[in-house]
Amino acid sequence: MIAVFESKKMPLVKTVVNGKHIEVERDRWALDVLLEMGVAVPTLCHHPAVEPYGACRLCVVEARKGKWTWLTTSCDLQIREGLNIETDTPSVIRSRRMSMELILSRAPHVESLQRLAADLGVGRPRFGPHYDIGKCILCGLCVRVCDRLIGASAISFVGRGRRRSVTTPFGAASESCTGCGACIAVCPTGHIRSFVEESALNIETWNTRLEMIDCKVCGTPFTAAKLLESVQGRLGKGGSLERVCSKCRRLQMCKRLGEAFHQV
Amino acid sequence: MKLDLKSVDQIIGKYDGEDSWLVMILQDVQDKYNYLPECALGRVAESLKIPLSRVHSVATFYSSFSLAERGRHLIRVCDGTACHLRGFTHIKEEISRHLGISEGQTTKDKVFTLDVVACLGACALAPVMAVDGRCYGNMNAEKVRVVLDLYRREKRH
Ligand code: SF4
Ligand code: FES
Ligand code: FES
C-alpha cells in the first residue's frame, strides 16, 4: 500500500498557461506546473506527498484543447500537447467562490478557511451546517496519508451524503493506528485533536489511546511505543532507534560537536 | 454477540478470496445474516487481507447495507417524487401505526424493519411500497394493513 513515486523521463510538450507559451514534461500535474510558475492557485485537498484526489474543487482552471473548453481541477489534470490553461477567467472565479462558500459553510469558524475565503472574496456563507460536524471538510488528506504513506489505514470515509465523515472502523479505538500524527500534520483545519496524558498519547478524534515511551535521558514521554516499533520494523536490521527525545538528542549532538571542535 | 462465522468463510471461498469482489461478498453476507455483523466485517477484512477501515467504508457507503440488526422482512416505502405527491406520508404513517415503528426501526419481535427510499422505479404505480424486494403499488391504508398482515401470518408457520 506504500506509494512509490516514479519519475520517468517524459517528452516535452507545448502548452499555454495564461497566454504564456511553455514547454513541460508530458503527464505532469497541471497544478504543480502552475505553482512552479508562480501562479497562485488555492487548494485544500492537495499535498505533494500523496496523489491528487480532486475533492475540494478550489484548484479549478479553464482548460482548452482544440475547440473544447472545460472547467476542471488542475491537481489531477495532466499536461498534454496543445493544452491551454487559463486560471482567472470569470467562470473559474465563480466556481472557486461557490466551492469555497460550501466548504466554509461546513466549518465556518476555522480561521485558515476564513482567510482563504477572504482571499477569494467570499464572506459569510449563505448556508450553514445544521448539525455538529466539527471542523472536518472531508478533504481526505488524513485518509490518504494514513493509507498510502504510513500504511496503517486506520481511518476511512464512512457513510455518504451529508452523513459522510472520517473515522476509525465502527468509531472504536483503532487497532492499526501507531500514533504517528501524520493525519494531524496534514489536516488543513485542525479537526483532529490529540493530547498527552499520564504518558499516553490520546488521539481523541479517532478515539484512540496509545502508551508512550519515556526518553531515557530526561524521562519525559516522547513518542508512542507502537510508532517506535513500526519504524524499527521498517528499518529492519538496517539501524536501531535510540529511545531519546528530540530535545535531548539535539543537546547530545551539540555537546559532541563542541568536544570535536575543542579537540582540533 | 458470538456468531458462527463459517458461512462468512464459505462465502469468501466462493469468490476465491479476491478483494475485488468485496461488494458482492458483503451482499452475500447480508443475505445470510440479514445485516452486516461487526465480527463478520472483521473476518472479511482479515481473509481478503485488506484494511478493516476499507471494508467499513464500503459497508457504510451503500444504503442497501445495514450494520444494525434487521427484521426478517424489510419494508421499503417510497418517498420519490411521484410517491411523495401521491400520498407517501399517509402510507408511512399507516405502517408506523400498524407496526409501532418509525423510519429505520425494527419491531420488537424482529419481524419487520421499516426503511424509506427514494424511488423504487415503479412511479406509475405510486404510491409504492416494497417488502423483501416485492413491489406493492397503488397503496392505501387498507392495503397496507392487508399486505403487512400477510407477511406477519407467514411467520407463524
Ligand atoms: S479530518 Fe482534516 S485531513 Fe481529514 S478529511 Fe477532515 S479536514 Fe481533511
Ligand atoms: S486541490 Fe484540486 S480539488 Fe482540491
Ligand atoms: S417515486 Fe416511488 S417508485 Fe418512483
Image (cartoon, rainbow, N blue to C red):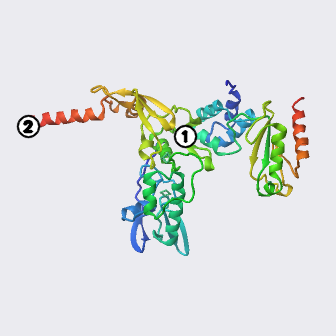
Q: Nearer the viewer, mark 2 or mark 1?
A: 1
Name the residue carrying label 2. A264
Disc sitting over residue A226 in the figure: none
Identity of the amino acid at label 1? Thr
Identify the subunit bearing mark 2.
A
B15 with respect to A198 (left or right): right
Residue nearer the viewer, B96 or B6: B96
Q: Position of residue A85 (x, y in %)?
A: 46, 69
Residue nearer the viewer, A84 or B62: B62
Residue nearer the viewer, A47 or A79: A47
> Can you tell which quarter of the image residue B65 is in?
top right
Quarter that holds the N terminus of chain B: top right
Q: Position of residue B74 (x, y in %)?
A: 79, 40
> Can you tell which quarter of the image residue A241 is in?
top left
Q: Position of residue A51 (x, y in %)?
A: 47, 51
Quarter that holds the C terminus of chain B: top right
Residue appearing at x 69%, y 25% in the figure? B4
Above or below, comparing residue B48 to residue A6 in the picture: above
- Is disc 2 placed on a helix, strand or loop? loop
Name the residue carrying label 1. A167
B16 with respect to A180 (left or right): right
Identify the subunit bearing mark 1.
A
Residue nearer the viewer, A190 or A180: A190
Q: Position of residue A147 (x, y in %)?
A: 49, 42
A249 with respect to B131 (left or right): left
